[in-house]
Amino acid sequence: MGAWLKRGGRAANWTGLAVVLAVLVIWQLLVTAKVVSYSSLPGPVEIWHGFRELTGPDGGLAPALEHTVRVVLTAWAIGTGTGCVIGLLLALNQTVASWAYATVDLLRSLPVVALIPIAILVWGTGDTTEVILGAYAALWPMLINTAGGVRGVPPRLYDVARTMRMSRTATLRKIVLPATGASMLVGARLALATALVVCVVSEMLGLQSGVGNQLVLEQSAMQPARMWAYVLLVGVLGIVVNAGLVRTFRVVFPGVAAVAERSGR
Amino acid sequence: MSERLVAPSHTNTSGDVVFELRDVGVKLPAGPAGRDILRRVEVRVHAGEIVGIIGPSGTGKTTLLRVLSGLLPPTTGSILLGGQPVTGPSRDAVTVFQDYATALLPWRTVAHNVGLPLEGRTSKAERRERVDRALRIVGLAECAAEYPWRLSGGMQQRVQIARALVVEPRVLLMDEPFGALDAITKGSLHDQLMDVQTATGQTIVFITHDVDEAVYLSDRVMVIHGSPGSIVHEVTTKLPRPRDQIATRDLTRFHEVRHELAEVLRYGRLA
């Protein structure tokens, strides 16, 4: 991921794209020549046709995609925001840390996916359930990376802050937060990936809207091309939101991004 | 020793006392009783003086500098800066740390690192002007927009010196400032530092474990020795200014001081 992050924003990775293209061509050739022949595995061309049907007049892809993107971003924002604050508290306040650490350790080791059926029972099959699940999933990577990042701030920087007689708020704002920035970016990216997975899976497991729900519907309608179109769509969605996050970060915090890219994270 | 060689340097030992340590002792928590790091340290630094503090490792050099900078309160005794007791870090005495790579903020450009101590204390225009001046003093005006980690070690240390100078402190405290640098870079930084000091009239207290560095830079060298450490010896170098990497090091007086320090460092006193 580090190399990818470094490359983004400079020249496009043409060799990498060529490999992707080659894989698609080989896949198509294998299917056309019937070397690989499963009723549920269409070739890329057929999947593309399925995709065109879905984006057509009554395809249903656009509203599903809009729903999933909206819910994932909402859940991610809530989860990372909360995770960031709790992570900072855990790392900076000894009392909070001693009271909360055991709970944090216990909760974060619970697989979120196992909580999906319970959440559906409790909050129903609406958007609320999905946002709660996504936010909960996004919380942990952000919390852990933020707390770890703060604990990794070189003690020397606190000496520097003290010799300049910086206030506590200034030290937090000008030293601690930027020094933790690279870790927080890692947490935010992991959180985004996790939130996407959990939201799509919860849509597959019973929620009534979104890309995951459509994917299962196409599966039961025996429409492999359309189903595959949704699968690939989820993959592309993951890449796009991640790239968007990284680019936004680079524009808003150029210095911290430069440090993150330097350390290869 | 020829008279020419002991021409009066602009040593200012008669100036006002800027810094004064009276009977300072430091005990750090270690084991049930704690460990004495410094004992009965007496230091007096005059305005405009360059004072080197040299000692073997484990004698509390860095602890002493932390006490001077107000980062570490002494267990006993008192510190006066400009006649006022020191209770914490003061902007009158700014520290330059040995580890420039961690002491600089990697996410800030050189100019923003140097401007950090002025943020919220001066107008933007004044800050820009002072940062610019400090960078010109250390010869880094061209690197203002660069990130510090893109610069060489010597340049990074100059950034840190600029960040201290921008505050215009009365005293510059330096903890083994050139310890991590190669001999050639060290030499040129020595001369730059002397030039800066001549231009600003700053008082400088620095820690070192390098005898040549101590003699070359200092008006006065103090030797810290023992465990717990205390100042066991003091030499006024009486070397002429401006100093020169080749000529000064050839002076008989340079070798005398060097010899004296080496002896004290080995035996803890003059043999």
Image (tube, rainbow, N blue to C red):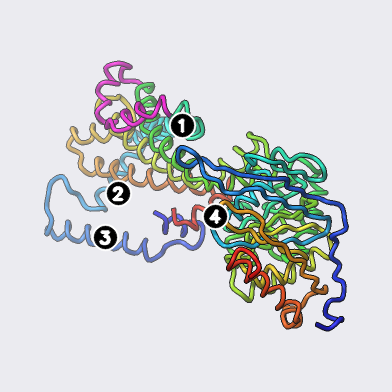
Principal SS element in the magenta part? helix
Provide the chain ID for the residue under circle 2. Answer: A
Pointer 3 or 2: first along the chain: 3
Task: Identify whether B61 is placed above or below B220.
Answer: above
Pointer 4 or 2: first along the chain: 2
Q: Residue at x 39, y 42 (%)?
A: A190
Tell me the element at label 3. Answer: helix
**Numbered label attached to residue B106:** none
**Residue A122 forms part of the magenta stretch:** yes
Q: Position of residue A78 (x, y in %)?
A: 46, 29
Disc 2 packing (10 Å; few <14; some 14–19; many ≥20): some
Pointer 3 or 1: first along the chain: 3
Closest to the camera, between mark 1 and mark 4, is 1
Pointer 2 or 1: first along the chain: 2
Residue that badge 2 annotates: A48
Q: Residue at x 30, y 24 (%)?
A: A208
Residue that badge 1 annotates: A90
Q: Position of residue B11 (x, y in %)?
A: 84, 65
Write down the region rendered in magenta. Answer: A98-126
Residue that badge 4 annotates: A258
Q: Amino acid at mark 3?
A: Val
User: In front: B45, or B174?
Assistant: B45
Q: Is residue A8 left or right of residue B162?
A: left
Q: Is residue A67 at least partly visible in the picture?
A: yes
User: In front: B134, or B185?
Assistant: B185
Q: Residue at x 69, y 39 (%)?
A: B88
Mark 1 and mark 4, same subunit?
A: yes
Provide the chain ID for the residue under circle 3. Answer: A
Pointer 4 or 3: first along the chain: 3
Tell me the element at label 2. Answer: helix
